[in-house]
Image (spheres, grey):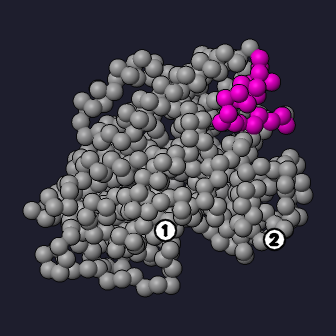
Amino acid sequence: MLSPDVPASPVSAPIGQTCQRPHAVVIGGGFGGLAAAVRLGARGYRVTVLEKLDAPGGRAYVHRLDGFTFDGGPTLVTVPFLFEELWSLCGRHFKDEIDLRPLTPFYKIRFHDGTEFPYYGDPDAMRAEVARLSPGDVKGYERFLKEAETAYRIGFEQLGHVPFTSFFKTAWALPGLIRLRGHRSVHAHVASHIRDPRLRFVFSFHPLFVGGNPFKVTCVYSLISYLEREYGVHYPIGGIGSLINGLVSLIEGQGNRVRTNAQVERILLDGRRAVGVRLTSGEDVPADVVVSNADSAWTYRHLVPAEARRTWTDRRLERARYSMSVLLWYFGTNRRYDDVGHHTIMLGPRYRGLVDDLFVKKILPDDFSLYLHRPTATDPSMAPDGCDAFYVLAPAPHLESGIDWREAAEPYRRKVARHLSETVLPDLEDHVVTQRLVTPQDFQDRLLSFRGAGFGLEPIFTQSAWFRPRNQSEDIDRLYLVGAGTHPGAGIPGVISSAKVLDTVVPDAKAVLT
């Protein structure tokens, strides 16, 4: 793991002088960028990852406060084999280096009336829980899960690693989408099988994990339900940051580097070909290939000159639809709350109305649904002895809402704290000993996410696959994109898969030198 106190290494000499490996620059040290660096290194590239912050991670940045450790964004792993593949590329074994623990249940959903639904991977346990709430919906649940498997086969296995470089590849996928009736939303798909409104939430909320509106995104996103059941939900001891550290170790083991405190100001072009980047410090870093793990809208709007863009113009980016954002409150307590599990989803009184407030009206709702993460339920090392580490996520509209977070953040945090204190964390406000608050404004200012969107472009049909910013830039030669804002989309499986797409679209190292 690089320390922010370690000075950045000088850039190696350009190709043709002292190094015969082509140089790839990766903008951003999030999961997508680090995975891209590993894959490019395995293919013979000399790689430099340039990270704006003082440590890698991006949205998975780790906050360390007063002996507490807080994962900044993602909190679970659902497809371990994607990481195993990266370790294997480097001749190492993932299981030897990462202690990944399966969670049972995956999470608990707490309804507004206080009743709970534990969400398991075991089919019999899930059938029993469905029957406990609504016996008449067990058969409908089983039909839903079968269709979720079909969505997984189409959306993840067939399309997740496909570079949509032409519309014909999108057309190739249409028969499968038609069979699945992909024009329906996830919620409409679930509602066609399940009647109980509580269970309709349980099996339709997953698109919110990747910034999607369950009432709008295609039912292909029901694949998440099957993916969780197939591979489980896991937590790495040491937190998600242990995966970031592991990827950095892989990169350095390949003889490549991750530079921190290195913000890219713009991508350097020779005509319409990327030839390097310029840092805000004024330093130019030459490259044969540039990969941007920065937010795709930010990449085009701020790093590529307008005159070089014919596809992702300022007008198109301004008119695009962006995902909701989030308010994140990290806090540590001087007592433990052992009745609270690792993941708890706490629902408010509304579902569709709340989602409309976030995505359509773009207002901060008076009520809220919360995601509460307590990693110390599984890993006590994340907090001092006798203490607990938490983060709570409250969905919020992105910055197009016009909310002044300098004024709104603290009152909303207090409201969240009161609600937690009155429900699952008694007397919470008397036991908080350290805390940090991250707002949609921070997503824009610190993480350079356009409009402060938490998950990049909203994953509606007209902004997916061929219609999304492509992994191989439409306008700039030798510029490639990975991360939440390109195909296949947000979430750890999505951004790791976006790096795998590079194996198809980035030329082999030998070809770059000729």
Q: Residues within 10 Å of mark 2 (few under 14, many from 20)?
A: few
Return the residue nearer the eye: 261 or 67.
67
- Camera-near label (1 vs 2) is 2
Q: Compared to 379, does 220 lie above or below? A: above
Kindly identify which numbered label has been placed on residue 458. Answer: none
Q: Compared to 352, does 20 lie above or below? A: below
Kindly identify which numbered label has been placed on residue 56. Answer: 1
Rendered residue at 20%/61% (across/down): 509
Q: Can residue 394 be seen in this view?
A: no
Residue 38 placement, left or right of 97: left
Does label 1 or label 2 sit earlier along the sequence? 1
- Please check the rendered image and state whether residue 134 is part of the magenta-colored stretch, yes or no: yes
Residue on which the image places disc 2 = 385
For badge 1, the amino acid type reads Pro
Coordinates of residue 219 in the picture (x, y in percent): 51, 27
For badge 2, the amino acid type reads Asp
